[in-house]
Image (cartoon, grey):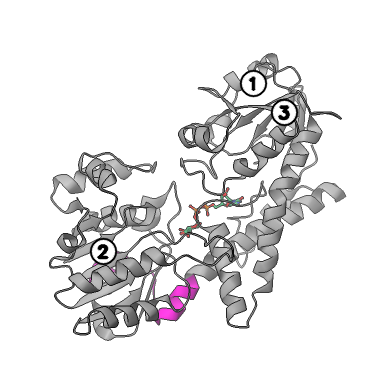
Amino acid sequence: MRIAVVGTGYVGLVSGACFAEFGIEVCCVDKDETKIRRLRGGEIPIYEPGLDVLVARNMAADRLSFTSDLAVAMEGADVVLIAVGTPSRPGDGGADLTYVYAAAAEIARTMSRYTVIVTKSTVPVGTGRQIAALVRDVNPRAEFDVASNPEFLREGSAIGDFMQPDRVVIGADSDRARAVMETLYQPLIRAGTPFVRTGIETAELTKYSANAFLAFKITFINEVADLCERVGADVQDVAAGMGLDGRIGRPFLNAGPGFGGSCFPKDTEALVRTGRQHDSPVRLIETVVDVNRARKRQMAGRILQSCGPDAAGKRIAVLGITFKPDTNDMREAASLEIIPLLQEAGVTVHAYDPAGMEEGRHLLPGVVWHEDAYAPLAEADCVTILTEWNEFRALDLGRVRALMRRPVMVDLRNVYDPAAMAAAGFHYCSVGRRD
Ligand code: UGA
């Protein structure tokens, strides 16, 4: 079996490398020639644990190749995965499908045999049908089927998520396409991974519903955290007590500064738009979008408050700027909202992040960057943890205290224990707990 993967972003590159690991011949294609040149030289454009080794191993075995020419990638391909970006359209929050349709049209022009055209990118309901219509239009003789095979991988644990998924969802409306997709996923089928075989629209909506539900779970616990603070309860214990109910589950009940990343913000907005378009509003998710947006401002206020009555002229140390740990991805990171609000209040921000600073330097002007977790703390009036990187979990608290002007920590990821922090002499403020 041979497949082409269009787009070498997160989803495309990880899927391509993982399918190659299954023994399938994979050719990844991207318009960005510099990226392709780098990939051929073994340079991985994203920070994803284990991906470099996987790519190198499969390139060496001649199962994984890279090209900027779609026609080359399509030669002899049984399946083509569309894994290009679907960013939020400025203005209306809908998913911008320009790249998806451009890829589909080019695929139509280069197809020479029966091919299953698969959307791996998150695309709004109805996109699969539109791709089919477009391909028929561009190449009326093309022999093809369209399928939807949404990807559920998380940045930072993408390879594990791909290799041992909770489930695989395949939306197709022909037996032929379904059979091809099952050949593609043979190793997972043999390993007993649950498969959801369904129609195209259902698969498309499943992906949005899953992401929106997880975003809802986070937003719910964030609001419960606010309430905990008012009533003197502890959100960690509430989450533990709720999460042990098998119908609820503990994951994604960690209160924090609000969700970010390249998926949840964009996908919740797109689902809201789809609901409105079909006169079937998803009101819960409309609220999730609003509450999550307001939360980042609220968290900036909390940090400023901890600096005392007048924050202007104070120095705040920020630990972690990426939208979550184990990634260098800055998209929709809470830091991008919070840090400028701190600066607007006249604060000087000193920061450190293990992987995000290269991008951070462009995105967050005025921040003073440091090369380790302790350097930004010198003479700081407050330190705030925005991302729960492991290296912030075991800071030498004595050293932290000695470096700071005032021992104040605003821990927006509940990394530390309030009692231990009080014992270490800190004025400690976290999320949804008695501090
Ligand atoms: C998310 C989903 O988890 C994946 O299943 C999905 O495939 C992916 O989107 C996608 O659509 O491509 P990802 O964006 O990598 O994956 O990140 P998550 O680990 O889900 O975290 C998203 C945000 O929620 C982060 O800002 C994180 O800090 C926040 N979060 C997560 C919380 O605030 N609390 C939690 O309990 C969990």
Sequence order check: which comes first, mark 2 or mark 3? Answer: 2
Left or right: 5, with 47 as reference point: left
User: Callout 2, which amino acid?
Assistant: Pro
Marks 1 and 2 sit apart, C-alpha to C-alpha, by 49 Å
Q: Nearer the viewer, residue 107 or 300?
A: 107
Locate the N terminus by quadrant: bottom left
Category of crowding for the residue at label 1, using alpha-carbon neighbours closer than 10 angstroms: few (below 14), some (14–19), many (at least 20): many
Instruction: Indicate which label's residue lies in the foreground, 2 or 3.
Output: 3
Q: Which residue is mark 1?
A: 377
Q: Is residue 330 above or below residue 112?
A: above
* Disc ID at residue 358: none
Q: Is residue 237 above or below residue 3?
A: above
- Secondary structure under the numbered disc 1 in the rendered image: helix
* Percent coordinates x, y for residue 78 in the rendering: 19, 71
Locate the C terminus by quadrant: top right
Which stretch appears magenta?
A: 183-206
User: Callout 3, which amino acid?
Assistant: Val
* Disc ID at residue 347: 3
* Percent coordinates x, y for residue 214 in the rendering: 58, 61
Give the residue drawn at x 52%, y 22%: 372
Q: Quadrant of residue 119?
A: bottom left
Q: Which residue is mark 2?
A: 187
Say if residue 102 shows up in the picture: yes
